[in-house]
Image: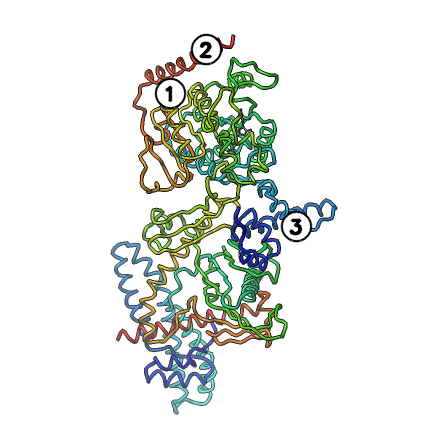
Amino acid sequence: MPRLATSLLREAYAIHPCLPLLLRPCRDLQAARNELRWLCEHAGKVARLRRAKGRDADPKQLLKRLVQERAAGKPLQYLLGTEFFGDLEIRCQPGVLIPRQETAASVMHLTRLLRAALDLPPELRVLDLCTGTGCIPLLIADELTRCRQDVQLRLLGVDVSDKALRLAQYNLHQTQRKGRLSDTAKVAFIHADLLMEPFDVQPAQTLCLKKAMNYSRVPPFWDVFVSNPPYISPAAYWKTTTRSVRGFEPKLALVPPLPADPATDTEHGDIFYPHLLAMARDVEAKIVLLEVADLAQAGRVAEMAQNMAIFDGIEIWRDQPDQPAEERGAQPSRFPIIGQGNGRSVLCWRARGGSWLGKGPSPVSPLDDARRLWESHRVSSSFFDFKFNSRL
Amino acid sequence: MRATPWICRPCLSRIARPAIRRQLRFQSSAAAAETIAPALLSRARTIALEHERLNEKLANGFDSKSAKKLGEYSVIVRALKEWEAASEAAAELTTLIHDSSTDTELRDLAADDLDATRTQLVNASQALTTSLVPIHPFAHLPCLVEIRPGAGGSEAAIFAGDLLRMYQAFCSRNSLRATLLKFENADGTTEAGVPLSEAILEIESENAYGIFRCEAGVHRVQRVPATETKGRTHTSAASVLVLPSLNENAAGEEDFENPESDYYVDPKEVRVEIMRARGAGGQHVNTTDSAVRLTHMPTMTMVSMQDSRSQPKNKEKAWKLLRSRLAQARREKREEEMVNIRRSVVGVAKMGRGDKVRTYNWGQQRVTDHRSGITVHDLDDVMQGGQTLDTVMESVRNWLMERDVEALIAEESSRK
Ligand SMILES: C[S@@+](CC[C@H](N)C(=O)[O-])C[C@H]1O[C@@H](n2cnc3c(N)ncnc32)[C@H](O)[C@@H]1O
């Protein structure tokens, strides 16, 4: 990390003695000043609460401690206990990944498209795999129910981490308590390991998605399928993530587990996607939105989706899909690339999904659609049969 | 409105025609103005004729535009009638008094009446003058007050903070709803003595723009800064910008959607920049990047907002601010032409961001407004947003009104 210029440190010190410390994680003065302001407000609030409980608390001491922890790299969101995800304030806790602004931007863009849809079903079902804090289903519920009271929403979040599930449940309660969740939306969270196959040995308390869904008696078919899975390869983890991410956020949420079969670094980073796409097909999802690390991974995931031959359309979204497309030396791509920023997600649609997104009706008849789903299913289950048999 | 000070102003005598000047001179020594500038009177009479014409027109069929005009004019027509009645009565009484054939008893009675009629005439003149001054089209709106330190380093920043608290106290004393839209100082507190880098106060109450319009400009402070060891007095300044604010409640959505409106901003012309995480973003980075910057491309007007940790909230505030700034700019541009005409005759300085409008002098415990010329000595009360600040602000509002009257006279006279 390059050293901070002395002049900058001096300028920061002149404004507030705590600022130079905050420059370490923030790097620029404006960001450091913002963080100082928020930490200050937080220290004041905590001190007031403690005093109300009869304990003595010095906001200056509190602030000093917070600033030191922040300087050591602890994420601001863990210190303040929350992060904003769209309009929602989501509780954060060490051990569970902090929601990212880019994820919120993709999800909001998706809901903005859906809000305008004329032919949504009376009950729209949304499945979010790898839900973490539960931020995605909660935001979709908030954004959609606000102007689509005509549609019942059912949302299901899935995660393998108990800690994440407890936090998601807490966030659900908080959102309800604040009156931000309308009665037309039902949200639930369940535990499942998405990398586990139905035929794998199921250890106690951990089930594959299909069995977990059966067990919790949730419907087998879902309209919208969203996931922000761990997508960072081991090499990128060391090269690309920041110190604060590595030092304080759970690796389980960022890097897929070591594959059983030998794999390249890139394949390792991509592990979740074939599983997710297969699950999306099995629940007969009409819209699929998967977050990715960059344009390269977006290209690979789009390719995988294409090869399944079940989708009517596939496109790649950048960080800000609502902004006019970036006009830099248009690299040829097989898939349309929408918006500005880094490559951030892959959107696929089939059947009525196209018209919900405003892409027009499906060019494929319902019968042919059923046929292509079944065909794709057959191809991959014979692959799993093979795997199953070879184990015997 | 206060009685007459404007007729004493030297600039008015420059623009008034000789005949009026004599009259004015005479009256400036008296307590109040009984007459009204002939230019204004003739304008009122023209309007009365127009009013009659419209009345006839409306009798033959309804037309909402004429009806609206008629409503506006009727105030003036009523004021004119009252003035004419009063001035006729005064003339009659005067003749009576000066007529040698009038007996003493009657003359005494007439003299008594004349006093009352004179007062009536003064009031009628005032009413007629005010009715002719166009009301500022945004006066009824809520407003944004933007405060920034100017020249003078951290002392200027501290003074900017003082001004903010002054306005906040003023608002709470007058039951005006005020919220901080943006507040930037080093540590997020509102303690006194903390340097401020920028603050935007939104005053949501109706008529707030009419009340605060007079505060726009450069406010100068003269005092010994807390940091000054040798006890020297420093001069620094803070600038105050006042914008009418059109929020959804105040004026209806259509103004945002209507391309005719000053507040219309074509979203296609605005570049939205979101402070993105550095580098790869996504799961790789966890900084709080909620700052939003909007740039209106045709005018390169830029607004950035990073107060809140919520990006949508910052975006919403930024849009509001951008709309207000653009509307102000458009209005100023439109007014510029008018002002140019007026300035060539009147020499009225446009009141804008660049002009030094007021001085706060700690050593002498006084506040002087350079426009109305008022000086008050209860500096502390002013800084606490007290009654004395009301007095100062009112003097400026009156001054503004006088400028409008002058401009009106100038316009009317140059028309002939
Ligand atoms: C990148 S985080 C996404 C969290 C949240 N959706 C968000 O956008 O902030 C990935 C989540 O996947 C969960 N996860 C990791 N491996 C999993 C698995 N095999 N099955 C289910 N969830 C898993 C982690 O616990 C983590 O909460």
Q: CA distance from mark 3 to mark 1?
A: 55 Å
Q: Which residue of the protein is positioned furthest toward the bottom in this rendering?
A: B100
Q: Indicate the quadrant where residue B42 lies.
A: bottom left
Q: Nearer the viewer, residue B112 or A135?
A: A135
Q: Nearer the viewer, residue B160 or B80?
A: B160
Task: Verify CB contact (< 8 Å) between mark 1 and mark 2.
Answer: no
Q: Mark 1 or mark 2: name the one nearer the start of the chain.
A: 1
Output the chain of dot 1: A
Q: Is residue B192 above or below residue B269?
A: below
Q: Mark 3 or mark 1: name the one nearer the start of the chain.
A: 3
Q: Which residue is mark 2?
A: A385
Q: CA distance from mark 1 to mark 2?
A: 18 Å
Q: CA distance from mark 3 to mark 2?
A: 60 Å
Residue A169, percent across and down? Answer: 59, 30
Please tell me if label 3 and label 1 are on a single chain.
Answer: yes
Please, what is the three-letter code of the amino acid marked with disc 3? Answer: Lys
Say which element carries label 2: helix
Q: Mark 3 or mark 2: name the one nearer the start of the chain.
A: 3
Please tell me if label 1 and label 2 are on a single chain.
Answer: yes
Say which element carries label 1: helix
Task: Verify CB contact (< 8 Å) between mark 3 and mark 2.
Answer: no
Q: Is disc 2 surrounded by few (<14), some (14 to 19) or many (20+) residues within 10 Å?
A: few
Q: Nearer the viewer, residue B135 or A1?
A: A1
Q: Which residue is mark 1?
A: A308
Output the chain of dot 2: A
Q: Which residue is mark 3?
A: A64
Does the rendering let one see residue A184? no
Q: Nearer the viewer, mark 1 or mark 2?
A: 2
Q: Is residue A315 above or below residue A77?
A: above
Residue A181, percent across and down? Answer: 53, 34
Please, what is the three-letter code of the amino acid marked with disc 2? Answer: Asp
